Amino acid sequence: MSVIMHPRPSPIAAAMYTLRDLDVGVIVIHGPSGCCFRPARLLERDGVKVVTSALLDDDFVFGSEGKLSRVLKRVDELFKPRFIGLVGSCASMIIGEDLKKAAKEAGLLEKTICCDIHSGSGDNTVGAISVLREATAMGIIPPAEFERQKRMLEMATLLEQTRGTARSEYIENSLGDPPKEVAHAILQVLASGGKVACVLNAKKETAFLYADVVLAIWDASRKLGGKLQVLANLDPDVGLPRVRAYSRRILDRFSEDGVVIDSITGGIDEYPVSGIKAKEMILQSQPDLAVISGIPHAVAVENAIRTVAVSVGSRAVANLKSLGYDYVVGERDAHQVSLGRNKRIRRSLLGQAIREGAGG
Amino acid sequence: MKSIAIYGKGGIGKSTLASNIAAALGGRGIKTLLVGCDPKADSTMNLLGKRIRPLLEIMREEKRPPPGGFTMVGFNGVVCVEIGGPEPGVGCAGRGLIIGIRYLTEVLDLKQFDLVVFDVPADIVCGGLAVVVKEGYAESALVVTSDEFMSLYAANNLCRGFMSISAKVGGVLYNRASERGKVYVESFSNKVGLPILGSVPASDEIKKADRVRKTLIETNPSSVASAALTSLADSVYKNCFCTIPKWIPIDDLEGIFHGDA
């Protein structure tokens, strides 16, 4: 069995994002202070407090449930959260620390969502599923919603293994195609009266960035002509309250700009299945160009239609190129750009290039 | 300076042998250091008559204690150190051993001793417990076993571990020896390619000495068991044999007891 050698998303980070989606007030990582530093800082921009139990070598040797218990109590005093998310780390889980015991000793078991995972637990979705399972057991989300989300996460994992960055043992970094060049190709189709399918197939808050591509193409089409088919996974009745609110905000903004959506392909957390639906619709309508933003590899039309893929991460870009998408634009780190700023659409590189190309 | 690490099944008498070997050699003027590596910190009790405060416990309060803060001189001038570790069921003893041994060898010049004995807990069940031989703090390991099946099973497992980390072993120490069981240990030793460095009979006197927290070398130096322990100590100190052992499949090990030896 080959080893995937390039860096992969961590189950700890996935657990933290899911805890944020559940609107916990504080996330406690039971680990060293540097554990998952970058996602922690990003999530703090989103209003979630993230702290660690700041484990040191002594704590690994002698155990640190007592220290964790004290941290939980202190966090409760300081921030008075409705719920606390408690996530393991490699070090604490390997030495067998009992998260629930520490929460119980702190008198906070009933408000603490304990997640016994670490970076070696497997796919990153394992972390998200673990949080959701615990939240279901605590009555925070209904069992049916857990089952739906679990199915989506398992499909997302399969998608990564078959068409994503988990499909090869090593993927090089790539910057992708220059946004100006890609914008020019899109504008040419519109100006010649062709049909462009605009597909938003995004996950979580990154939808606020990728939605900008749809808005830019819509504006350009009004100036230059051409036909548009807009497909978006923005069902406002699917997912956790936070995720539904994302969809509503983006739909409101589309509505303000007069964007007409031909089909809502699913919810924001349904990108593996909404991608399949989008694929079917594109193959049926046969546009001259399909511009797919977010998780383009979930929309497997690259061998049937001329395509533009818009995504994030230099390895994702390289992977999309090797799958056969004609143009691939690598946006700036979508989480970095959109986290904590999800009240409005963020400007994307490609959107900007399209606007400039279309005359501002 | 000669350095050895003593391994074997839990409860097989490693600490008893280690402290008696150290006491016997100390009595001959051989400058000996006994390093207890078990979190229970009980290896040196029979030389000191009491439990010494373990190094890791001291390091929690004082990051870099001087050697005088964690060493004690026991019976026959044997210098004693306990690495220590977590309470049962928590933390990581292996990690503790890595930290403790690294610090010990950094601040205490082991070359001042003629012999350094590391008394290591149980099997090498994790990388941490293997560190003593893996990182070369001990030149070679010694395997303590009785003639019971489970003890030889553990000894065989240790040989497997030593083979996988390419650690050298000096031989087998046969504890609780009996005429009837000797054949099993001899057969095992032949199969894994290790010599038996000596044997110590099952002895009530050793148990009695243990109960008063002393070595038999101290309480009854003229006893038969004491003579066996002294002979074993000499053999360990003079032994120059060192090899990476083999290990044998379970069927072969069972065969030893079914008369296929």
Image: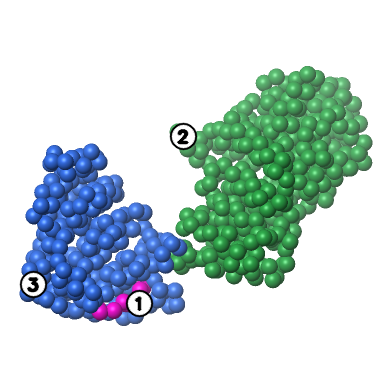
Chain colours: A green, B blue
Q: Which mark is residue A2?
A: 2
Q: Quick check: B145 left or right of A133?
A: left
Q: Quadrant of the N terminus of chain A?
A: top left
Highlighted magenta segment, given as a residue range = B48-55
Q: Is B84 part of what is drawn in magenta? A: no
Q: Quick check: A220 left or right of A26?
A: right
* CA distance for labels 2 and 3: 62 Å
Give the prevailing secondary structure in the magenta stretch: loop
Binning the other alpha carbons within 10 Å of mark 1 as few (below 14), some (14 to 19) or many (20 upward) gives some
Residue occupied by mark 1: B53
User: B51 or A11, which lies in front?
Assistant: B51
Residue depicted at x 15% and y 57%:
B174
The quarter of the displayed image where residue A181 is located: top right
Residue depicted at x 39% and y 62%:
B93
Under mark 3, the amino acid is: Ser
Q: Which mark is residue B198?
A: none
Q: Nearer the viewer, mark 2 or mark 1?
A: 1
User: A32 or A176, which lies in front?
Assistant: A32
Q: Is residue B133 visible?
A: no
Q: Nearer the viewer, mark 3 or mark 1?
A: 3
User: A290 or B128, which lies in front?
Assistant: B128
Q: Position of residue B115 (x, y in %)?
A: 18, 68
Q: Is B51 part of what is drawn in magenta? A: yes
Residue occupied by mark 3: B223
Q: Position of residue A264 (x, y in %)?
A: 82, 32
Q: Nearer the viewer, mark 2 or mark 3?
A: 3
Binning the other alpha carbons within 10 Å of mark 3 as few (below 14), some (14 to 19) or many (20 upward) gives some
Name above or below for residue A203 compared with residue A35. Answer: above
Residue depicted at x 36% and y 58%:
B128
Q: Position of residue B175 (x, y in %)?
A: 16, 60
* CA distance for labels 3 and 1: 32 Å
Disc 2: which chain?
A
